[in-house]
Image (cartoon, helix red, strand yellow):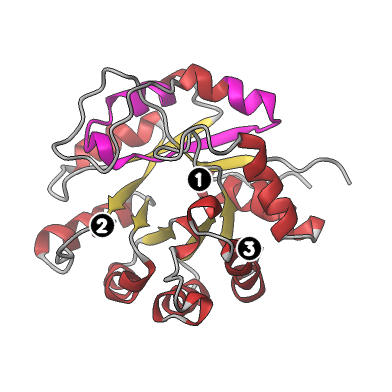
Amino acid sequence: MPAPMIIDAHVHVFTQDMPLIDNPRHAPKYGFTHEQLIATMDAHGVERAVIAAASPWGDYNDYTIEALRQQPRRLRGTIICKPTIERVVLETMSQDGVVGVRLPFISMKQLPDITTFEYRSFFRRLADLDWHVHLHTEGENLPFFIPKIEDSGVKLVIDHLGRPDPKTGVNGDGFKAMLRSVEKGRTWVKMSAGYRLGAAAPDYARELVRSAGPERLVWASDCPFVGHENQFSYQSTIDWLNDAVPDETTRAAIFGRTALQLYFGEEPQS
C-alpha cells in the first residue's frame, strides 16, 4: 500500500517573547516557530497540521493566525477566547483558517458553568460557523461537560485519548461518556499525547479503535511536547500509532483521512 497521508491534528507554535498569562501551567523559555513546525513536518512526511491553542498564552492568538496566513494550504488552527467574542471576529478568523475553539479546562479547581447564556450563545455561534469545540480536561470531568456541549449542537473534539483516570482506565465513567458521545455522530477524539498517559495509553487507543472506529479518530503528535521537552522525538509519536493500531487501513484513516474531512473540509482522493 502507498504511504498514507499524515495530518498532525495537534501541534503548538509560539515565540519566546509571546506574553504568558498569570500563573501558567507551563512557561516555555524557548520558541517553536511555524517555520520550525513546517521543517519538522517535511522531515517526517507530514502533509498538513492543526495548530492547537495552548493555555500558557491565553487568548493571545496572534501568532497562530500569522502562521495560518503563511501556510493556508497546510495549516488550520484553534483559538482560545472568551465566550463573549463577537461573531464578526470569529468570521474574520475563519477566513484565516481557524476552525475551532479550545476550552483549556485542565487542572481547574472549580469547573466553569457552561450553561450560562454567554456559553450557550457562544456555542451556537460556533455551530453556525461549522467550527468545533476542542475540549481539554481530565477524563473524570467529561461526564460533566459532554452533555452540555452536545445540547448546543456544536461539534466536539476531545483531547489526548480523553485523558482517562489511570485508576479506572477504559472502564471509567469519563471514558464511557466519551464513547457514548462518539456514537451520536458529532464527537471526535485525538489519538495524541500517549506519552502523557503512561503504559496503558496503547490500551486506550485500541479500545477507541474497537468502540469508536477510525472515522472518529485523528492522530496527533502534541509537538513540541511542552512540559516534556527533549524526552520524546517526533518520530516516536508516529511509531506509537503504528504499534498501537496494527491494521494499515485503520491507521490510514486515523493518520489522515478523518482529519482531512474534519479540519480541512476535503474528501480524500480514492
Sequence-wise, the earlier of marks 1 and 2 is: 2
Q: Which mark is residue 107?
A: 2
Image vertical order of residue 41 relative to residue 205, above or below: above
Sequence-wise, the earlier of marks 3 and 2 is: 2
Image vertical order of residue 186 relative to residue 191, above or below: below
Q: Residue at x 20, y 25 (%)?
A: 19
Mark 1–mark 3 distance (CA, rounded to whole Å): 25 Å
Q: Which mark is residue 70?
A: none
Q: Residue at x 23, y 31 (%)?
A: 60
Question: Which residue is the site of mark 3?
Answer: 202
The type of residue carrying mark 3 is Pro
Residue 192 in view of the camera? no
Image vertical order of residue 210 relative to residue 46, above or below: below
> Seen in the image, is 157 located left or right of residue 29?
right
The type of residue carrying mark 2 is Ser
Mark 3–mark 2 distance (CA, rounded to whole Å): 24 Å
> Seen in the image, is 133 located left or right of residue 233?
left
> 10 Å neighbourhood of mark 1: few (<14), some, or many (≥20)?
many
Mark closer to the observer (1, 2)? 2
Question: Which residue is the site of mark 1?
Answer: 263
Q: Secondary structure at mark 2?
A: loop
Q: Residue 26's x, y, as percent? A: 30, 38
Mark closer to the observer (1, 3)? 3
Q: Residue 208's x, y, as percent? A: 59, 69
Q: Secondary structure at mark 3?
A: helix
Sequence-wise, the earlier of marks 1 and 3 is: 3
Q: Secondary structure at mark 1?
A: helix
Is 97 colored magenta in this rendering?
no
Mark 1–mark 2 distance (CA, rounded to whole Å): 27 Å
Q: Residue at x 18, y 63 (%)?
A: 120
Magenta part of the chain:
39-68
Between 268 and 251, the one lying in front of the other is 251
